[in-house]
Amino acid sequence: MKPGMEKENFVRMLTEMTHCLEDTEMNLQESVQIVREKMYRDHLVHLESTSMLLDKLEGEIQQPIPFSSETIHGQASVKLEISC
């Protein structure tokens, strides 16, 4: 083979490899973007669920606990039983 032909083949091979690497990089970027979007959606769902749960718990905490005379007498008798 002539030296010029070997050089052309080598340049052609390197050019093909470069195109393959560019394609691979684009595919990887797309895959990473898809994974990021999925993770974002999953985290958003978890945050919304947690926020709703916290709102519900805060609502329950802010409600006054109803006390009746029976409740107070029941608590007093429990205290007496425990102390004996």
Image: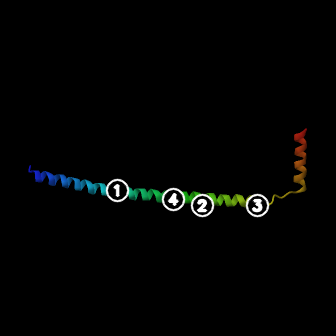
Dot label at residue 66? none
- Name the side, left or right, on which 42 lies relative to 21: right
Secondary structure of residue under mark 2: helix
> CB of mark 1 within 8 Å of CB of mark 4?
no
Q: Residue at x 59, y 58 (%)?
A: 47
Q: CA distance from mark 1 to mark 3?
A: 54 Å
The residue where tag 2 is placed is 48
Secondary structure of residue under mark 1: helix
Amino acid, disc 1: Glu
Compare marks 1 and 3 and give the one earlier in the sequence.
1
Q: CA distance from mark 3 to mark 2?
A: 21 Å
The residue where tag 4 is placed is 40
> CB of mark 3 within 8 Å of CB of mark 2?
no
Compare marks 2 and 1 and give the one earlier in the sequence.
1
Residue nearer the viewer, 18 or 76: 18
- Name the side, left or right, on which 73 lies relative to 22: right
Q: Position of residue 14 (x, y in %)?
A: 22, 53
Amino acid, disc 2: Glu
Amino acid, disc 4: Tyr
Q: Position of residue 35 (x, y in %)?
A: 45, 56
Q: CA distance from mark 2 to mark 1?
A: 34 Å
The residue where tag 3 is placed is 62
In what quadrant of the picture does the C terminus appear?
Answer: top right
Q: CA distance from mark 1 to mark 4?
A: 22 Å
Q: Position of residue 77 (x, y in %)?
A: 90, 46
Q: Residue at x 10, y 51 (%)?
A: 3
Compare marks 4 and 2 and give the one earlier in the sequence.
4
The residue where tag 1 is placed is 25
Compare marks 4 and 3 and give the one earlier in the sequence.
4
